[in-house]
Image: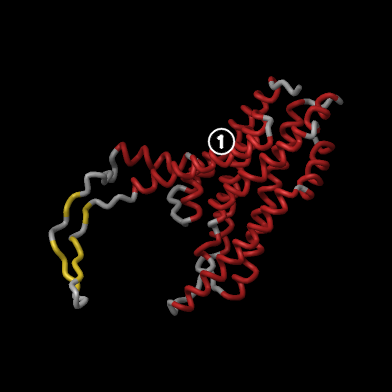
Amino acid sequence: MTNLLAPNLKRLLKNSAFRIAAAVVAVIGLFEIFMMYRDSIIEMDTPYLDGGLFSFAALGVFALAAVVPLFVGSEYSDGTIRNKVVVGHHRASVYLSLLRTSLFAETLLILVWTAAYLIPGAILMEHANPLWVYLVLYLAMFLELAVFSVIFTLLTMTLGNKAGSAVVCILFALLLVMQGIVVKSMLEEPEFYGPEIIISDDGEVSYGGEMEPNPNYIPEGSPKRAFYNFLMDFMPGGQALQIAGHTIDNLSKICLYDIGWLVVLTGAGVLIFRQKDLK
């Protein structure tokens, strides 16, 4: 597999989609750290690194949704994948080498984001947590993005079309993240609606009405809330939002779910690719 992986990595580093994605990620990282620093100065508050450090858990989903299908899809369109099979490489080895290349791309993008965010951030801001907390969250972010990398590789290797795969991967990424947003909003519904706030013409604030029960509130301890909490932890889109927002309650459980996703999706991808017609 090493003979297959090394050329893949060389082509990845020369791939225009990967280079553009890395540049965009670096610019966004720099922009976010300076915007956070500016806001802290305006609000006269202590700036902390934690605010946006892990927002790449969500941003990276869309970066990978573009890079993976465009790189893997180009391997299809150039005939590289077919040629590897023709010369005698096992299909499983071909698939796994491309999957490892996708994971390598993910790792490099995480490093680009970290460098762009931390180099100025370490100078301008303070950190609020010990080092081990950041390392554990980085592990969770890597596993969550690895699941997305495996999904995008599976979709692209199944479809075999560069442009079509890119569209499908981006739409699938949007679907998973939107699913997480919807579930998160349902779980955050308040138990009661507060009284109406009334502001008079002279600026005086008063309150009208009484606290009213929220019919959309999901009671604590109910089976429905337990199910939605499970969806937030189990589905990659919910994980991305939790890691980005530092709102993880079950970190070990999320990591175990991710490992399960990686094993199942990788196995499914190998089985599907073995049956695929490469003509």
Residue 127 spot, x, y in % from top left = 54, 69
User: Secondary structure under badge 1?
Assistant: helix
Q: Which of 19 and 270 is in front in this view?
A: 19
In the rendered image, which quarter contains the C terminus?
A: top right
The location of residue 183, given as percent across then percent down, is 39, 43
The answer to whether 142 is drawn above or below residue 227 in the figure is below
Q: Is residue 102 above or below residue 48?
A: above
Amino acid on which the number 1 mark rests in the picture = Trp
Q: Is residue 255 left or right of residue 249?
A: right
The quadrant of the image that shows the N terminus is top right
Q: Which residue appears at 34% of the width and 47% of the height? A: 187
Horizontal and vertical percent position of residue 224:
31, 38
Q: In this view, does 221 lie to the left or right of 258?
A: left
Residue that numbered label 1 is attached to: 261
- Name the residue at 52% across, 39% down: 257
Horizontal arrangement in the rendering, residue 20 relative to residue 208 (left or right): right
Picture mark count:
1
Left-right relation of 8 to 232: right
